[in-house]
Image (spheres, grey):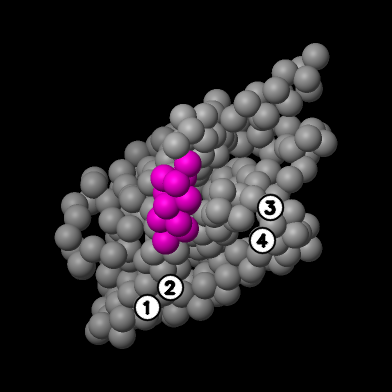
Amino acid sequence: NNETSGGDFILLGFSDQLHTPMYFFLTNLSSLDLCFTTSIVPQLLWNRKGPAKTITPTGCAIQLYVSLSLGSTECVLLTIMAFDRYVAVCRPLNYTSIMHPSFCKALAGVAWLSGVGNTLIQGTITLRLPRCGHRHLHHFCEVPAMIKLACVDIQANEVQLFVATLVLLLLPVALILVSYGFIVQAVMKIKSVQAWRKALGTCGSHLLVVFLFFGPSSAIYIQPKRSYGRSQGKFLTLFYTVVTPTLNPLIYTLRNKDVKGALGRLLR
């Protein structure tokens, strides 16, 4: 899994023709997916060795901080990539001036810093909750599952989690929908079939990645308390933390002629 993401990351670094704003953000997404799968998969493989299937408190805290930070970063980064597609389709003549390299670096920095800031706040608050007696976490180490282990009233924590979800999940989804709303309006004015194909090729991969990531993560963080079963919750978490990051490089590579062309040149 990690070799796929890492290979895409290396390819983007070696090909000069892919040094554009879209591929700059794709490089960040590939490195992000590589770290995401690495934070989850090793523990999953380790648990398959024996019947205990446990994780140490320290390991759980590390997994919580790392996965929450990377997940929050991906929410913001996918929103930035939607804005990049909006500028490319709706403001093509001003694309180079708007998506300047320094501006792109600043946007990427905002995405990574927002992820770190969110995990420092939410992760720390969650880990400081008192846990009485022997309570087992039949789930991955993530905020919605861990706050249910507390032996105190967690209503305030649920409100705090809802606010964070509103800012880092629902708001990005709304901004992405607005961006693609403008894109659809712009493409509708053009009656060329070639323009439709170009727009679909430009935006189709990103839309698919957005659906695969925000769908399962929204089901975990937005739904009411205890509204999903143990196995269902594990599957949804596994999907957006492991399956989706693994599929992202394949989706962008197989649907993008520039990436496939650069891969062929690199292999030759």
Near mark 2 (Cα within 10 A), the count class, few <14, some 14-19 or many ≥20, is some
The disc label shown at residue 167, or none: 2
Q: Secondary structure at mark 3?
A: helix
Q: Name the residue that disc number 3 marks.
A: 93
In the rendered image, the vertical position of residue 263 relative to residue 38, given as above or below: above
Report if residue 49 is visible in the image: yes
C-alpha gap between disc 1 and disc 2: 6 Å
Residue type, label 1: Val
In the rendered image, the vertical position of residue 212 relative to residue 179, given as above or below: above
Is there CB contact under 8 Å for labels 4 and 3? no
C-alpha gap between disc 4 and disc 1: 23 Å
Q: Secondary structure at mark 4?
A: helix
Near mark 3 (Cα within 10 A), the count class, few <14, some 14-19 or many ≥20, is few
**In this rendering, would 220 be left or right of 113?**
left
Q: Name the residue that disc number 1 marks.
A: 163
Region of the chain picked out in magenta, as a range: 178-190
Is there CB contact under 8 Å for labels 1 and 2? yes
In the rendered image, the vertical position of residue 21 relative to residue 41, given as above or below: below
Q: Is 185 within the magenta? A: yes
Q: Earlier in the sequence, mark 2 or mark 4?
A: 4
For the C terminus, which image quadrant? Answer: top right
For the N terminus, which image quadrant? Answer: top right
